Amino acid sequence: MNSLAGMLTDRLSAAQVVDGIEAERWAVCGRIPQAVVFPESEEQVAEILSLSSEEGWQCIPGGKGGWLHGGQPPQGVDVVVSAERMNEISAYEPADMFIEAQAGAELEVLERRTLECSQWIALDPPGGERGTLGAMVAVGAAGPLEAGFGSPRDQVLGATLVTGDGRVLGLGGRVVKNVAGFDLLKLVTGSWGTLGMITSVTMRVHPVPATDRSLLFKGRDPAEAAALACRLAQAPLSLAAVELLVPGDAESGANASSPLVAVRILESVDGADEAERLVSERAGIEPFQRLEGEQSAAIFENVRAMEDGAELVLRLSLLPSRLPELVEMTSRLSGLYDPTEGWGMRLAGHAQTGVLRVMIAKMTHSTDGLDQARVVLGVLRRSLEAEGGSLVVSQGPPEIVGALGAWGDSGPVAPFNAGIRAAFDPASILAQGRLPQ
């Protein structure tokens, strides 16, 4: 055991610290930590971060490790602090519509618990249900249901955060109207561990809808499907999701060759029938397929898993009305991958938010291929930023992410961000480099 791991073992126990080969699976963007520590309480998290602040160790908060490969590579990784063993449900009050759990609680476990009372957490982040509550909030991950229910930032009621120097902060509470002054919860959600380690979260829950229905529409090509998705997203009714789905070059199976628009309706039976009528009227065509219940949910479970196995994942954004333009821009990426490797390139667009996910199974790894990728992605990012949009590299080879940066230019808010981080992390030990400086 190395000396850093030994110091942590002195504070905790040998069973709570791993290093060497056992630490390899906890690599952050390919960088292996000197130690991985598994605290079992908020107090232990505070002790670990306080010691790290004194020693100058670079720390990365984590859950079960699912998101450590994504985002911007950190400047250094000495310690990964995993919430995996902090996984208890602290409180669940169906009548008050909230559930509180430790950060390491799996989303699947929370879903099973709330379903017992015909309730659910209306979030479907990429990666499925195997992720943890704290990690989802820390990276601000959202899926198609963001259209109807909002992102994690909209659904988190409260959280406990341990700052870089070991202070424990209770943020928010258990009801919606409990915030006076500056809402720090909004800062913590999506902060990628740069402000502290989330140890517990209180989430809003919703009644399980009486009807889960998906309507599938075909497009002749991606541009036509994108235009249809935009038209449906602007309909004057509440839709749970409107998703543009473009299969990869090499994918096969029923309907795999055609771009689809998937509309999800979560309503009462009468409400679903009326929504279907209005959607079909606005589309100008009838859906080629109508799915109910588990089949409807399965379509969107597949959407959650679309990034699995991808070597490069991009998120392009513009105004929602410009989704067809985003789709056309992806033609610039055709030379960056081998269409015969895996599925090639998939697209999934959130029509209500104007975010288009691009997933490439296998990139061309020759020197010329990587150089071309850096140039093409750099030009595309600058083009989008000039229009008020963005290009985020959610995950990718170090040669790409390291050269481009995951997030792009943070612009005039950079000094504000730096000041906030200094207040939460005076010794600058937390996830340094994970977000733009």
Image (cartoon, rainbow, N blue to C red):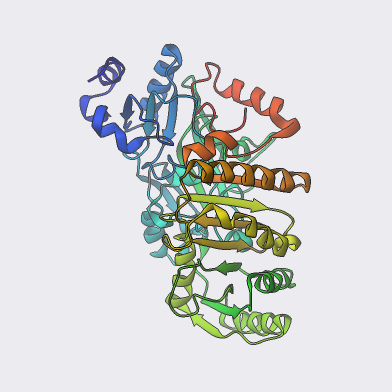
**Image coordinates for residue 108, horizontal then vertical, percent:** 38, 56
Q: In the rendered image of this protein, does residue 260 appear above or below residue 329?
A: below
**Which residue appears at 46% of the width and 45% of the height?**
365
Q: Residue furthest right?
A: 387
Q: Quadrant of the C terminus?
A: top right
Number of labels in the image equals 0
User: Is residue 52 visible in this depiction of the protein?
Assistant: yes
The residue closer to the viewer here, 219 or 351, is 219
Quadrant into which the N terminus falls: top left
Q: Quadrant of residue 310?
A: bottom left
Q: Is residue 240 above or below residue 5?
A: below
Q: Residue at x 56, y 34 (%)?
A: 403
Q: Residue at x 45, y 50 (%)?
A: 311
Horizontal side of residue 38 vs 248, given as left or right: left
Q: Position of residue 130 (x, y in %)?
A: 37, 53
Q: Is residue 192 above or below residue 107?
A: above
